[in-house]
Amino acid sequence: GTLIVTDSTISANRGINYGGGITNSGMATIVNSIISGNRATNSCGGAIDNEYGTLVVTDSMISDNYAGTYGGGIYNRAVGEVTIHDSTISGNTGTYCGGLYIGGGTYDGGILSVSGTSQIINNKARTGYGGGIYFSGKSLTLDGSQVAVNSNQAYLPITESGWYQGWGVYSTITPATPGFDPSKQVTGNTQLLALTDRILASQELWLNTHPILDTSLIL
């Protein structure tokens, strides 16, 4: 199917598994909208789960979402395609990766393009790789001189081996970078070392998977 979200806010939703805000397996277009404060408590895609579909995000903000596993902001499965243009991915948290997770899965797939004035900032991977972007798919493009991947945090890798295998961006392939200068546009990303933060992540995941029973008196 086709989904078009324009001039809208999707917030404060909670999904037990995939997609706290949206799950897409067709064609989804998000324009001039905010997706914020959503949770995929036990699984992936705090804001959006792109399940083998095509997702285009333009002039929008995806912020302060949470995933119990992968992709606090967006989780892309297998052969899905994600385009981020003139948008901000900020303040999202995942246990294993923060802002954007694009995985190949059992397919040689997964495509991500980030362009225009897009900012991927202040996201966090509490116990894993890729505070801003984790990519293990087929094609990754960071396009233009105004894209920024800044001030993200990740626990892994222990030592960065290059700008695209670090705490801001972790990719298993070399990205295409037309007009993009990683020395200036991938900055301020740091390793998450605080043990207390990792303990809190484990506790939060446990609470999400073990709901507290209502102990109020029922008459």
Image: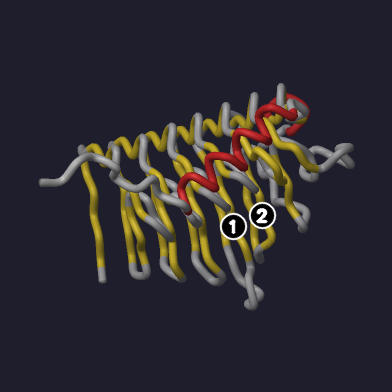
Q: Give how far across and how far down residue 147 sits, in percent.
A: 58, 33
- Marks 1/2: CA distance? 5 Å
Q: Considering the numbered disc 2 on the image, is that residue within a helix, a strand or a loop?
A: strand
The image's colouring method is: secondary structure
Q: Please indicate, yes or no, whether residue 123 appears anywhere in the rendered image.
A: yes
Residue on which disc 2 sits: 135
| Three-letter code for the amino acid on which mark 1 is drawn | Ile
Query: Looking at the rendered structure, which numbered label has been put on residue 201?
Result: none
Observer-nearest of 170 and 211 = 211
In this figure, what is the number of numbered marks? 2
Q: Note whether 80 is above or below 4 in the view shown.
A: below
Q: Earlier in the sequence, mark 1 or mark 2?
A: 1
Callouts 1 and 2 close, C-beta under 8 Å: yes
Q: Quadrant of the N terminus?
A: bottom left
Name the residue at the left extreme. 219
Q: Classify 10 Å Cα crowding around label 2: few (below 14), some (14-19), many (20 and above).
A: many
Q: Give how far across and how far down residue 153 sits, in percent.
A: 68, 31
Q: Note whether 144 is above or below 176 in the view shown.
A: above
Q: Quadrant of residue 114?
A: top right
Q: Classify 10 Å Cα crowding around label 1: few (below 14), some (14-19), many (20 and above).
A: many
Q: Note whether 193 is above or below 126 in the view shown.
A: above
Q: Residue at x 73, y 52 (%)?
A: 171
Q: Residue at x 57, y 29 (%)?
A: 121
Observer-nearest of 205 and 6 = 205
Q: Give how far across and how far down residue 33 sits, in percent.
A: 28, 38
Q: Note whether 176 is above or below 7 in the view shown.
A: below
Residue on which disc 1 sits: 102
| Three-letter code for the amino acid on which mark 2 is drawn | Phe
Q: Give how far across and how far down residue 164 sits, in percent.
A: 77, 43
Q: Considering the numbered disc 1 on the image, is that residue within a helix, a strand or a loop?
A: strand
